[in-house]
Image (cartoon, grey):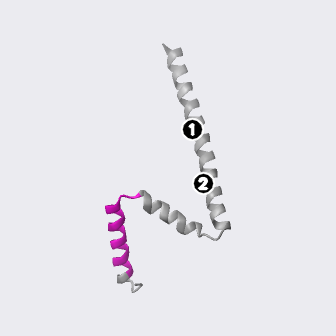
Amino acid sequence: MAEATDDRLRLLIERIERLEEEKKGIADDIRDVYAEAKAVGYDAKIMRQIVRLRKMKPDDRSEQEIILETYKAALGMG
């Protein structure tokens, strides 16, 4: 029984390691796309913000924008 458990654990660990390696590769690809965008004149920092906003639910995004505007107004920024 212990050998089967050990094999299962080893397989799970190896699977995690493969996924971590894939994740690193994908992160490198994303970084390359941002570098390409920057090279043609886009602002990568703003693009990252847009990507983050697009991931949000519309209601959450609206709420965040309202709070941001409220804080900016309170600080005399807008």
State yes or no: residue 71 in magenta. yes
Residue 12 coordinates in the image, percent (x, y): 53, 29
- Looking at the rendering, which quadrant does residue 53 occupy? bottom left
- Mark 1: few, some, or many residues within 10 Å (few <14, many ≥20)? few
Residue 26 coordinates in the image, percent (x, y): 60, 47
* Magenta stretch: dominant secondary structure: helix
Mark 1 vs mark 2: give the one in front.
Answer: 2
Q: What element does badge 2 sit on? A: helix
Tell me the CA gap for discs 1 and 2.
Answer: 16 Å
- Looking at the rendering, which quadrant does residue 18 occupy? top right
Circle 2 is placed at which residue position? 30
- Mark 2: few, some, or many residues within 10 Å (few <14, many ≥20)? few
Q: Nearer the viewer, residue 32 or 41?
A: 41
Residue 67 coordinates in the image, percent (x, y): 34, 72
The residue under the point 51% across, 22% down is 8
| Magenta region | 56-72
Circle 1 is placed at which residue position? 19
Q: What element does badge 1 sit on? A: helix
What amino acid type should be assigned to the residue bearing mark 2?
Ile
- Assign the C terminus to one quadrant of the image: bottom left
Q: Which of 18 and 75 is in front in this view?
A: 18
What amino acid type should be assigned to the residue bearing mark 1?
Leu
Of the numbered discs 1 and 2, the one sitting upstream in the chain is 1
Q: Which of 71 and 41 is in front in this view?
A: 41
